[in-house]
Image (cartoon, rainbow, N blue to C red):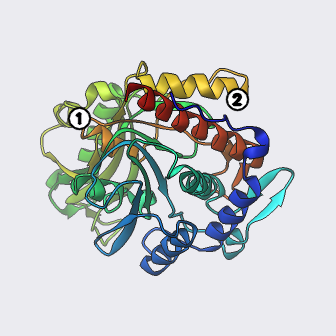
Amino acid sequence: MNKKRQSTQSDIPIDTILEVAKKLIKIPSVSGDIEKSVEVLKFAETQLTGINFRPFASESIPSLLYSNRDKSTNRFKIILNAHLDVVPGASEQFEPYIKDTKLYGRGAYDMKAASAAKIILFKELIHKVCYPLALQLTTDEETGGINGTAYQIQQGIRGDFVITAECGSNFRIVHEAKGMLHLKLIAKGKVSHSAYPWNGENAILKIYEALDAIYKAYPLPKAEAYKTTINVTHIQTTNSSKHTITPDNCEVLLDVRYIPQEKKVIIQNIQKLLPEGITTEVVFHTMPHETNSNNEYIRSLQRIGQSILHRDLELRKQHATSDARYYSNVNNDGVEFGPIGENQHHNEEWVDIKSLGDYYQILKKFLLEIDAKETMIK
């Protein structure tokens, strides 16, 4: 067995992580901005000089895959997944600063600081682990991940276990998340003068009937509950006369977040609820993220995290989704697991600096323990 010295708090390069995180935050790599997406990846390249990588691009959106193997390797034991894109923010949010042990800035929590920790850790361990290890850097997670993580998977990239540092986990291990369905309901009616409604068919009222049936079957919870939710996000009609014409068309967009148990039937279940004359159109659909809570890597991550944080690491099912779902689609296991922070997509977004060090230490011990087991087997 190849014994390796375990990391201590003094081993954690927190100053380097913060320096890289600040530089990442300064680049306003908002999803969809190709120029800034290229720039943020170019900066990552400067931190990983001399390490083998493969560039990817889909619809002009770039992503990278670093590895300790040659460029033909598609299968890895562990993939560290990180997205470097952010949601839009005011100019001052791209000027990072530290206050009261927290790093502030757009992307500090979601998820450039954690990405910086992964970049530094990957560089440290690249020649210290014997198994295939990859670092996946993408720039479109905030707009769905189709041209980043999903595209790399389409090109054959696979992992036995994937860790994405998605915000919201706060050292909880998210092993399951809901599927996401954007569904359009379309109603057609018949125009009439609004003073003579019996001569027409009001398409808005047809949509109302549909929504009434949907919410009787799927009532919105009044508190957090891990169940399927259906939320109305947009409604429109082309009726240009707001008062004197009965509208003959209406469309509504639904954001459906469904539990894995409904993944094969969610669309049909909704369609069965709709009254006659309502049609549906799938605008966007991604499956749930699912990894068994008894997965050996999850148990290892949980045990190591407990030894460093001196508390239990909760296993969690999440309402929102992440790029981990794309690996579930090809039967690869994975989790969302990241440091402590708050206010993602809001003002005063921050990540706790000490938790960044703890995060680095947990991942390092996790990756080296796998190496020790692989070395023993060999």
Per the image, the residue denoted by label 2 is 308
- Tell me which amino acid carries mark 2: Ile
In the image, taking residue 353 as reference, residue 211 lies left or right, namely left
- Circle 1: is it few (<14), some (14-19), or many (20+) Cα within 10 Å? some
Query: Please, is residue 124 above or below residue 366 in the view?
Result: below
Q: Residue 73's x, y, as percent?
A: 28, 53
From what the image shows, is residue 115 above or below residue 315? below
Residue closest to the eye, 123 or 219: 123
Quarter the C terminus occupies: top left
Count of numbered tags: 2
Q: Which residue is mark 1?
A: 270
* Mark 1 residue type: Ile
The residue sitting at 57% across, 67% down in the picture is 47
Element class at badge 1? helix
Residue 229 location (% of width, % of height): 40, 34
Corner quadrant of residue 286 = top left
Judge by depth and name the residue closer to the eye, 262 or 10.
10
| Quarter holding residue 212 | top left
What crowding class fits label 2: few (fewer than 14 Cα within 10 Å), some (14-19), or many (20 or more)?
some
Secondary structure beneath dot 2 equals helix
Residue at screen point 76% across, 58% down: 15
**Residue at x-position 28% and y-position 59%:** 151
Vertical position of residue 277 compared to residue 376: above or below: below
Which mark, residue 56? none
- Earlier in the chain: of badge 2 and badge 1, it is 1
Residues at marks 2 and 1, CA–CA distance in whole angstroms: 46 Å
Residue 103 spot, x, y in % from top left: 75, 56
